[in-house]
Amino acid sequence: MASSSIGGTGKLPHILVVDDALVQRMVTERLLKLHSFKVTTVDSGDKALELLGTWTAAMKKVDMILTDYSMPKMTGYDLLKRLKESSAFQGIPVVIMSSENTRGITRCLEEGAIDFMIKPLQNSDVQRLYTHFNHHLQIKLE
């Protein structure tokens, strides 16, 4: 089990997991918590936007959003676009995940996703998330 903070700051990385499939949400949450992530989960893009809109800088802050690609109503791609269009959320790194190697990978990366992962997530994927966190923190400090 990793016990790594962001860039050695002592702060545990906080991930918002967005997935309409309950079992996938639970599996992803458990894996991330085993690796010392703080995790919040929601079951739709709409709920993710609602939750993010209620949090102020003084409250909870999300360091990264991990969203399923294929969801009803608002897909992961749609959520990504909405986040990148918002000045309040465009700086939050977004990772798209899918249970299949979809043709939407390129489109998501072009729209601003920092990575695309195949579900279910593995330990090696979690290490990639830490790399993304530390890279994002380094950019913010420059």
Image (cartoon, helix red, strand yellow):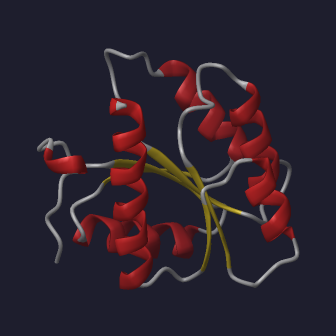
As rendered, which of 80 and 38 lies closer to the eye?
A: 80
Q: Residue at x 60, y 39 (%)?
A: 48
The residue at 17%/60% (across/down) is: 4
Q: Is residue 10 left or right of residue 142?
A: left
- Residue 8, how many percent across, how many down? 14, 49
- Extreme-front residue of the structure: 142
Give the camera-side residue of 93 and 45. Answer: 93
Looking at the image, residue 79 lies above or below residue 141: below
**Rendered location of residue 90, percent (x, y):** 63, 31
Q: Quadrant of residue 34?
A: bottom left
Identify which residue is drawn at 24% across, 69% down.
35
Q: Quadrant of residue 1?
A: bottom left
Where residue 93 appears, as percent x and y from the top left, is: 54, 46
Q: Is residue 33 visible?
A: yes
Q: How many marks?
A: 0
Q: Residue at x 47, y 47 (%)?
A: 64
